[in-house]
Image (cartoon, rainbow, N blue to C red):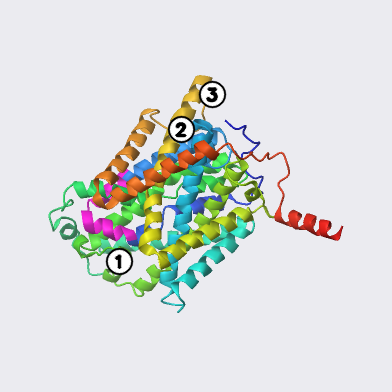
């Protein structure tokens, strides 16, 4: 295993504050998947889909709690990929880092397209032009000090959080008949074959879909590494994650199914708009369009951030070219940001010019990779916690019911993969994702040791310093 560097990451200024991390964590669980994608799940499974959100929420809570413990026990190492490397070695570290980077690069491209299609109604430009502008805009946000990213994400997340909290309060008052003409909650929940109108099987088949709507919580733990107290911020984030999931997801889904008949919802149409229209809220469509656009921009911004940090860490470990470690004077990893932006642009272009051949293939290959990442986090936790116990190290931030809950979480992730293999609509994605992981691991076996790690004790050459050296050589 490669010798760990001093901090296992670029020595960046601690530019993010606790305020940024708190809002990144809050906004991280609210995305377009909740605002729009939840309609498909409700339409397929009925009101009982809320139970799936509860179950998946507990799984995410367990994964984040495990991640929180290993970060708090050894803060400053870097992203969770470095803890996977610590537990499983360089080859798995190589594969997990590149797979995670690939997953979020595909997200950059797909979110850019989604945002462009929304903006097309207001700005009459081709989708590919708007996609390029969105990616360039988010690249510029990330091109400067981490604090700029934090501020941008803070305000984008604030819009999402304010929207969802206001929605929950209004919907609750409507259900309680405080205003409006009232609603037949019993009829909407039980009027057509009860809570599970299509049986239990559709609920199980929708577990992967619901899980993907909640992805991204782990980004806040990576961002916490750029604060003055990573351990404290990570522990705070992971402690409150369960409350956020229950508040934002479960309460929203329950209120939606109480107010609007589940059979009246259509996939791709926001159920939040439907509820606001029933309640008589003026400008419901515009309000949700702004919220959804902020969710898309927030996801795009976070994707740019996480891909650049993962790519930089890979370069530090010798798993990517060393020039990617270069940072600007404000410590932003601009080379890694540029490469990730270009890769995201290529994904976006593929969705426009080759939607079936290339873009569909990329979506299938990346679709299940977040599950593999969560599985590796769980196994890494089990390994590292076992080492800690054997060494007699005391832990201040521990997960309850060890090792049973961590093993149960790992089994649950495996069962989700099995559900994807059984479900014809998800089977291709499952096989493609597993195939991508195997190919990446084989690459790790052949290339993981070819490049030398970058020693952090050596000064990291910034872009400005490189230009100065080149100008001096030219003058000489």
Which residue reaches farthest front?
Answer: 446
User: Dot 1 lies on which element?
Assistant: loop
- Image location (x, y in percent) of residue 99: 47, 46
**Residue drawn at the location 58% of the way across and 45% of the way down:** 320
Residues under numbered marks 3 and 2 in contact, where contact means CB atoms less than 8 Å apart: no
Separation of disc 3 and disc 1 at Cα? 52 Å
> Where residue 140 sits in the image (x, y, percent)?
60, 63
- In the image, 468 versus 239, the foreground residue is 468
Answer left or right for 137 relative to 44.
right
Which corner quadrant of the image does residue 142 belong to? bottom right
Name the residue beneath numbered marker 2.
381
Q: Residues within 10 Å of mark 3 (few under 14, many from 20)?
A: few
Residue 103 relative to residue 171: left or right: right
Q: Is residue 422 above or below residue 114?
A: above
Region of the chain picked out in magenta, as a range:
37-55
Establish if 403 lies above or below 104: above
Instruction: Report x, y in % for residue 469.
Output: 79, 54
The disc label shown at residue 393, or none: 3
| Label located before the other in sequence (3 or 1) | 1
Q: Quadrant of the N terminus?
A: top right
The reply, left or right, for residue 406 in relation to residue 102 is left
In the rendered image of this protein, does residue 99 appear above or below residue 264?
A: above
| Residue 195 visible at all | yes
Foreground residue, 8 or 72? 8
Mark seen at residue 236: none
Q: Quadrant of the C terminus?
A: bottom right
């Amino acid at each position: 295993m490669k010798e760990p560097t001093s901090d296992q990451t670029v020595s960046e200024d601690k530019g993010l504050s606790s305020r940024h991390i708190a809002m990144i964590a809050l906004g991280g669980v609210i995305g377009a998947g909740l605002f729009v994608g939840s309609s498909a799940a409700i339409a397929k499974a009925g009101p009982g889909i809320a139970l799936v959100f509860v179950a998946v929420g507990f799984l995410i809570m367990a994964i984040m709690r495990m991640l929180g413990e290993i970060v708090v026990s050894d803060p400053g190492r870097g992203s969770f990929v470095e803890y996977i490397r610590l537990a499983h070695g360089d080859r798995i570290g190589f594969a997990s880092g590149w797979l995670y980077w690939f997953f979020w690069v595909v997200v950059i491209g797909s979110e850019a397209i989604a945002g462009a299609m929304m903006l097309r109604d207001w700005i009459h430009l081709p989708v590919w032009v708007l996609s390029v502008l969105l990616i360039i805009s988010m690249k510029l946000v990330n091109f400067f000090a981490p604090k700029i990213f934090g501020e941008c994400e803070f305000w984008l997340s604030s819009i999402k959080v304010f929207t969802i909290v206001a929605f929950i309060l209004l919907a609750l008052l409507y259900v309680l008949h405080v205003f409006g003409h009232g609603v037949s909650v019993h009829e909407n929940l039980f009027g057509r074959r009860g809570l599970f109108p299509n049986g239990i099987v559709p609920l199980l088949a929708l577990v992967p879909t619901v899980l993907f709507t909640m992805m991204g919580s782990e980004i806040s733990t990576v961002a916490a590494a750029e604060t003055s107290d990573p351990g404290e911020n990570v522990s705070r984030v992971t402690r409150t994650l369960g409350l956020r999931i229950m508040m934002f997801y479960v309460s929203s889904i329950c209120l939606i199914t109480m107010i609007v008949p589940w059979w009246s919802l259509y996939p791709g149409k926001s159920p939040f708009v439907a509820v606001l229209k029933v309640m008589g809220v003026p400008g419901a469509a515009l309000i949700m369009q702004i919220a959804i656009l902020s969710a898309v921009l927030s996801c795009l911004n976070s994707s740019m951030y996480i891909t650049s940090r993962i790519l930089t860490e890979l370069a530090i470990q010798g798993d990517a070219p060393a020039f990617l470690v270069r940072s600007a004077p404000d410590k932003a990893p601009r080379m890694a940001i540029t490469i990730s932006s270009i890769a995201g642009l290529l994904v976006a272009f593929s969705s426009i010019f080759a939607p079936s051949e290339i873009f569909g293939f990329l979506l299938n290959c990346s679709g299940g990779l977040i599950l593999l990442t969560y599985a590796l986090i769980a196994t890494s936790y089990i390994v590292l916690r076992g080492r800690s116990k054997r060494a007699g190290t005391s832990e201040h931030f521990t997960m309850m019911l060890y090792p049973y809950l961590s093993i149960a979480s790992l089994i649950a992730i495996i069962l989700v993969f099995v559900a994807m293999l059984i479900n014809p609509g998800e089977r291709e994605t499952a096989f493609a994702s597993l195939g991508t992981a195997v190919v990446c691991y084989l690459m790790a076996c052949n290339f993981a040791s070819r490049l030398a790690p970058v020693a952090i004790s050596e000064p990291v050459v910034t872009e400005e310093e490189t230009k100065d050296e080149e100008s001096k050589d030219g003058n000489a």
